[in-house]
Every structure is written in structure tokens, then in C-alpha cells.
Image (tube, grey):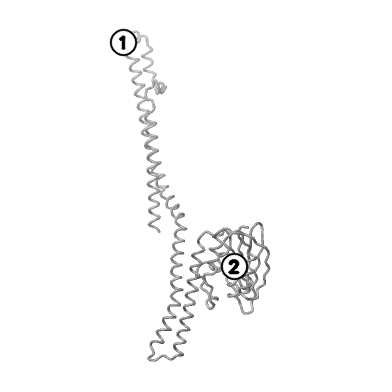
């Protein structure tokens, strides 16, 4: 990325240099094209002209018409020469100062270009790093069930005469690993589908939450008030389902789950919290990244895609999502969507 940043900076400097050179050239040309005749520019005699004027005004000299004419001609020539010298000095100073100013601003433009290019590329660098991390994590997650299947098969095939129990056990292990791989692939496909712009249909988060809670078959404390919003019913149902399933899955034995919906300040609000294990508040923002799990959650089922899918669906619907660690343990997730 530094090479890209350097190329962008060089491009900024070249463009600024070209534009600055054009401005200096045009300015110099306009000033050089101004009238140069003393009569045209209205130049008056400058400097010490006392001796010259004294002779030209002395009757001893002016009595001679030829001298008077010569005096007038020399006066005009001197005046023109002085004006031309002043003009050339002005043009030289203009060119010198303009060139020095241009060089100084080129240096400043290089520094500013480097900073601007870095700021412009910062999201790209972050997105590139996140993409590489996502691919690496996805490959790791997919490798796990494949390794389990290969190990189960190799162990049984290495025996001269596997028993039926061993073959059955191998089949069960492979089936479990296949189920795990299918769940991961389904999660990845869902994550990819939620990147598309959603449809805008009238839906009620309360109705969706009620259907999701009924489908889980678990005891959930529900306080569901109307929460109308516009969006894609399928992805919004996935959002609610992920939050409720996560709250149930990542809970302590005998723990509780609360689901609330409502309408607040013109927005549809969904809140899901549980009495799970203690969570470090600093680790909460990272839960919305793909494949991110807490240390306490490594032993439970799941691929670490649930909250990542939630965050992506919320973003696609121009909403906000906030997660907070509860003091007594567990997590509170609040989703706010345009009403």
C-alpha cells in the first residue's frame, strides 16, 4: 500500500506543478504584455533630474532651437530607458518570486499529498486487511471439519479388518463434520447475500420476533410492542433469529433471555439480552467481526458468523447496532432501524 500511496502523492505533486507552472506563465505573460511606453503607462520623470532640467531651462542653452530639441529628445529617451529598466526589473522580480513560491508550494503539496493519500487509502488498507483476515479465517474454519473427516477415515482404513462398530463410528464422525461444514457454508452464503441492497416492504419486528421465539421452543421473556419498519422480511427474520439463537446458545445453565421490541423516536427498536458468562467490555466490539469468538465460547456450537451477519443486515437497512456487556454477565444487543 505504501507504493500506491507514493504513486498518488507523485500524481498530486505533478498535477500541482503543472497547474502552478501554467499560472506563473500566464501571469508573467499578462504582465509582460502591459503597455511599455511612458506616455501609455503615464510614467513621470523619476529620480534626480535637477541638473538636466536646469540646463534645459537655462536660457543660455534653450535659446538654441537645436539644443532645445536635443534636450527634449534626450529627456524622452532617458524617460523611456528608465521605464524599460523598471519594467524589466519588475518582470525579473515577478519571475523570481513566483518561481520560489512555486517551489515552496510544491514541497508543501508533496507533504499534503502524502497525508491526503494516506487518509484516502486508510479505509482501503483496512478493508484489504479485513478481507485477508476473513479469507484466512474461512479457510481455517473449513479445514477443521475436513481434518476431522480425514482423520476418521484414515484411522479406520489403516486397520486390516475394521469392525462394523468402527465403520459406524467413522460414519457418525464424518456426518457430524459434514453437518458442521454445511452450517459454515450456509453462514458464508447468508453473509454474502446480505451485502445486496434490501427490498423495502412494511414489516413489524414484533411479529418477526414472536415467530422466531415460537420456533426456538425455549423459554424466553418477551415484551413485544409494535416496531414497524421498511426492509427485507427474509434478512430481518435472519437478524432476529441470529440474535435470539445467540442469546440462547451463549448462556449459562438455567440462564434467562429477554427479547423486547418497540418504537422509539421514530425508529423501530429490537433489544435482546441474556444472563450469559462474564464478558470483557473491550472484547464486545470485535464480536461483530466474522469468526470472532470469546474464550468462553470456544466450546459451544457456532461458527462466529451470527453477529457479523446481524451487523451486515443492519448496515444494509441504514440502521445501527450496539452491544454492551451486562454487569452480571451476558450481553445486551440493541438494534435500531428507520421507522
Locate residue 236 relative to residue 60 in the image: left or right. Answer: right
Q: Position of residue 42 (x, y in %)?
A: 42, 22
Name the disc covering residue 240, or none: 2
User: Left or right: where does residue 205 sit relative to residue 28?
Assistant: right
Measuring from the top left, give residue 228's x and y in whole percent: 64, 60
The crowd level at tag 1 (other Cα within 10 Å; few <14, some 14-19, many 20+) is: few
Residue 243 — which label? none
| Image quadrant where one finds the N terminus | bottom left
Residue at mark 1: 66
Q: Which structural element holds mark 1?
A: helix
Q: Residue at x 45, y 74 (%)?
A: 142
Residue 185 placement (x, y as % from top left): 47, 71
- Which residue is painted at 43% across and 80% down in the image? 149
- Give the camera-side residue of 164 and 291: 164
Disc 1 vs disc 2: which is toward the camera? 2
Answer left or right for 39 relative to 196.
left
Against 213, residue 32 (above or below) is: above
Residue 333: image quadrant is bottom right
Q: How many marks?
A: 2
Q: Residues within 10 Å of mark 2 (few under 14, many from 20)?
A: many
Q: Is residue 179 above or below residue 207?
A: below
For marks 1 and 2 on the same chain, the one whose residue lies earlier in the sequence: 1
Estimate the spatial distance between the alpha carbons at disc 1 and disc 2, rounded to whole Å: 110 Å
Q: Nearer the viewer, residue 107 or 58?
A: 107
Amino acid at each position: 500500500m505504501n507504493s500506491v500511496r507514493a504513486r498518488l502523492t507523485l500524481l498530486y505533486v505533478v498535477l500541482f506543478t503543472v497547474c502552478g507552472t501554467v499560472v506563473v506563465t500566464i501571469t508573467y505573460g499578462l504582465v509582460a504584455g502591459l503597455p511599455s511606453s511612458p506616455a501609455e503607462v503615464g510614467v513621470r520623470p523619476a529620480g534626480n533630474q535637477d541638473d538636466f532640467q536646469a540646463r534645459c531651462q537655462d536660457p543660455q542653452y534653450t535659446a538654441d532651437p537645436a539644443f532645445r530639441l536635443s534636450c527634449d529628445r534626450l529627456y524622452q529617451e532617458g524617460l523611456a530607458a528608465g521605464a524599460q529598466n523598471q519594467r524589466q526589473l519588475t518582470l525579473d522580480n515577478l519571475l523570481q518570486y513566483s518561481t520560489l513560491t512555486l517551489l515552496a508550494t510544491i514541497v508543501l503539496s508533496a507533504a499534503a499529498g502524502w497525508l491526503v493519500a494516506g487518509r484516502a487509502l486508510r479505509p482501503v488498507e483496512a478493508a484489504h486487511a479485513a478481507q485477508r483476515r476473513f479469507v484466512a479465517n474461512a479457510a481455517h474454519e473449513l479445514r477443521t471439519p475436513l481434518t476431522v473427516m480425514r482423520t476418521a477415515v484414515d484411522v479406520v482404513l489403516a486397520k486390516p479388518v475394521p469392525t462394523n462398530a468402527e465403520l459406524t463410528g467413522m460414519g457418525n464422525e464424518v456426518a457430524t463434520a459434514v453437518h458442521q461444514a454445511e452450517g459454515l457454508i450456509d453462514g458464508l452464503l447468508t453473509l454474502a447475500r446480505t451485502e445486496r441492497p434490501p427490498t423495502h416492504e412494511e414489516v413489524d419486528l414484533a411479529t418477526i420476533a414472536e415467530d422466531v421465539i415460537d420456533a426456538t421452543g425455549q423459554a424466553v421473556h418477551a415484551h413485544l410492542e409494535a416496531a414497524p419498519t421498511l426492509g427485507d422480511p427474509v434478512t430481518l427474520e435472519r437478524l432476529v433469529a441470529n440474535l435470539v439463537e445467540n442469546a440462547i446458545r451463549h448462556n449459562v445453565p438455567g440462564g434467562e433471555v429477554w427479547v423486547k421490541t418497540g418504537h422509539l423516536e421514530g425508529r423501530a427498536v429490537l433489544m435482546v439480552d441474556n444472563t450469559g458468562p462474564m464478558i470483557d467490555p473491550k472484547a464486545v466490539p470485535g464480536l461483530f467481526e466474522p469468526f470472532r469468538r470469546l474464550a468462553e465460547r470456544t466450546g459451544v456450537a457456532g461458527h462466529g458468523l451470527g453477529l457479523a451477519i446481524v451487523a451486515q443486515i443492519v448496515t444494509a437497512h441504514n440502521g445501527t447496532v450496539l452491544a454492551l456487556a451486562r454487569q452480571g454477565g451476558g450481553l445486551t444487543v440493541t438494534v435500531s432501524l428507520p421507522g
